[in-house]
Amino acid sequence: MEVVKGSELTITFDGTRCVHSRNCVLSHPEVFVPNVKGEWIHPDAASAETVLQIGINCPSGAIRVARNDGSGTSNVAPVVNLLRLRENGPLAFEAPLRVAGQDEPAPRATLCRCGASARKPWCDGSHAAAGFVASGEPAARDAAALEARDGLVEVLPQPNGPLKVVGNLEVVSGTGRTVNRVTQTFLCRCGQSKNKPYCDGSHKAAGFVAE
C-alpha cells in the first residue's frame, strides 16, 4: 500500500488490487509516471478535479483519492450498480461492495473469472498468460427493470464454486449494452462454463479449487 500526500489531495495505491489496465499512466502520465525509480505518484501534477476523476475511473479500486480537507473523495457510489464484462478478461464491478464478508474500500473491484488468479477472488492479470477466452458481448436476456438500481452488492465466493452475487445489478457488455438485470445470480469463476458469465456447474467436472 502506497500513500502519497500532495498539497490538496492524498492518493492511496493498493498494488494487490491493481489489474494493470494502465488507464492511469496512459491518460495522465504526469501524475502516474511509469517505469521510473523512486517516486512515481505525483498528486500535484494535475488539477484536483482531474486527479479525483482518475480515482473514479480506476476499474479495480486500486487507486483511491481524497481531498486533504475532507471535502471530497473518489469513492463515490454509482447511481446505477454495474457489472462490466471485459472481453477475454475479468468481471468489473461498479457498486458499493462487500466481498467475502468484507466491505471494500472503494465502490469498484475487478474479480477473476478465468480461474487462474493467484489472488482469488480478485483478478491479478493471469487471464492474459492463460489465454482465457470469454466474450464481453453475450446475448441479452429478457429482464424486468429493477425496482432499485443502487445499494450494496454482496459477492460471496462459494467454496470450489462460483461467485454468488446478491444485490441490484445491471450486467453490461464491453460496448455498454445492458445484457441482464439481476438481484441475485451465480457467476462463473472457474473459466469453464459454457454459459459465461454465468455458472453452469462446470467447476465440478473441472475440479476447480478455490476457497
Image (cartoon, rainbow, N blue to C red):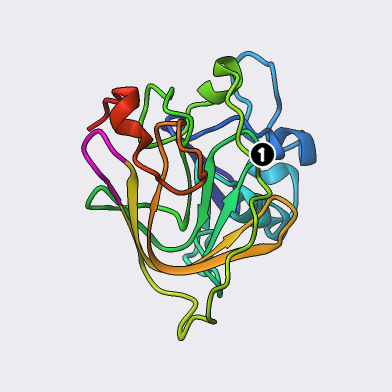
Q: Is residue 57 above or below residue 28?
A: below
Give the residue type that dot 1 points to: Glu
193 sits to left or right of 137: left
Q: Position of residue 204 (x, y in %)?
A: 28, 31
Which of the image's four quarters has the C terminus? top left
Is label 1 in a helix, a strand or a loop? loop
Q: Residue at x 33, y 32 (%)?
A: 203
Q: Position of residue 148 (x, y in %)?
A: 46, 83
Write down the residue under mark 1: 87
Q: Could you tell me if residue 86 is visible in this image?
A: yes
Q: Residue at x 70, y 60 (%)?
A: 49
Q: Could you tell me if residue 77 is visible in this image?
A: no
In the image, 47 versus 7, the foreground residue is 47
Count up the numbered dots. Answer: 1
Which of the image's four quarters has the N terminus? top left
Q: Position of residue 40 (x, y in %)?
A: 63, 26
In the image, 16 versus 146, the foreground residue is 146
183 sits to left or right of 41: left
195 sits to left or right of 128: left
154 sits to left or right of 132: left
Please tell me in which quadrant of the rendered image residue 29 appears: top right
Q: Main secondary structure of the magenta part?
A: loop
Check the image and name the residue furthest to the bottom: 147
In the image, 134 versus 167, the foreground residue is 134
- Mark 1, residues whose alpha carbon is within 10 Å: few (<14), some, or many (≥20)? some
Q: Residue at x 41, y 36 (%)?
A: 122
**Magenta part of the protein: which range?**
156-161
Q: Position of residue 58 (x, y in %)?
A: 60, 46
Q: Is residue 5 above or below residue 124?
A: below
